[in-house]
Amino acid sequence: MSETADTSASDRRTEAPAQPGKHTGEDRVRKFLVVLDDSRECLNAMRFAAMRAEKTGGGVVILAVIPPEEFNHWIGVRDLMREEAAERIRAHYEVFAKWMRDKHGIDPDLVIREGEPVEEILGQIRDDPAIGVLVLGAGTDRSGPGPLVSQLSRASGTLPVPITIVPGGLSKEELEAVT
């Protein structure tokens, strides 16, 4: 998969290019933005985004954010760690992308950004006008729904797109019933 990089002082992001005529802002396809991370609730958010995209003729953008604290090292070590993090993300993405293609006929885009997760999510929404819905998975443990859900739901009244919060405890069958 070829990737393009856009680097600035505050943000470094890598984006898998859209296929010609597919998932571009010009084709009016509504995209579901879903965050790829190591949380258990990520799986339900991915499932929901893929099922809704399939049923509505939309697309999926999978966003992975590498927090800046992962690279507080010497330049050479930082660059190596950045590349290793990107490789782990691409491997994780490929699992979800294959499932989305095989089960739902959805070919998701991957975007990797570096920075604070909430800022990068909002930045991606600003950068891609075709994003119509942000899909987040809510955690099921006693500590609450998770930091992204907590922070973004507080700001939900000012966001440019609606948020869909998918309960982490829903079964695959329950997700299918609500999508």
Image (cartoon, grey):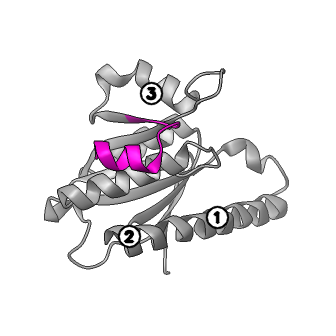
| Label 2 secondary element | helix
Q: Report x, y in % for residue 99.
A: 46, 69
- The quadrant in which residue 174 appears is top left
Residue 33 visible in the shown view: no
Residue holding disc 2: 103
| Label 1 secondary element | helix
Choose mark 2 or mark 3, whichever is in front.
Answer: 2
Instruction: Identify the amino acid type marked 3.
Output: Leu
Tell me: 81 left or right of 93. Answer: right
- Neighbour class for label 3 at 10 Å: few (<14), some, many (≥20)? some
Residue drawn at the location 50% of the way across and 35% of the way down: 118
Q: Report x, y in % for residue 92.
A: 60, 64
- The quadrant in which residue 140 appears is top right
Residue holding disc 3: 152
Which numbered tag is attached to residue 109? none
Tell me: 21 left or right of 73. Answer: left
Residue holding disc 1: 86
Instruction: Identify the amino acid type marked 1.
Output: Ala
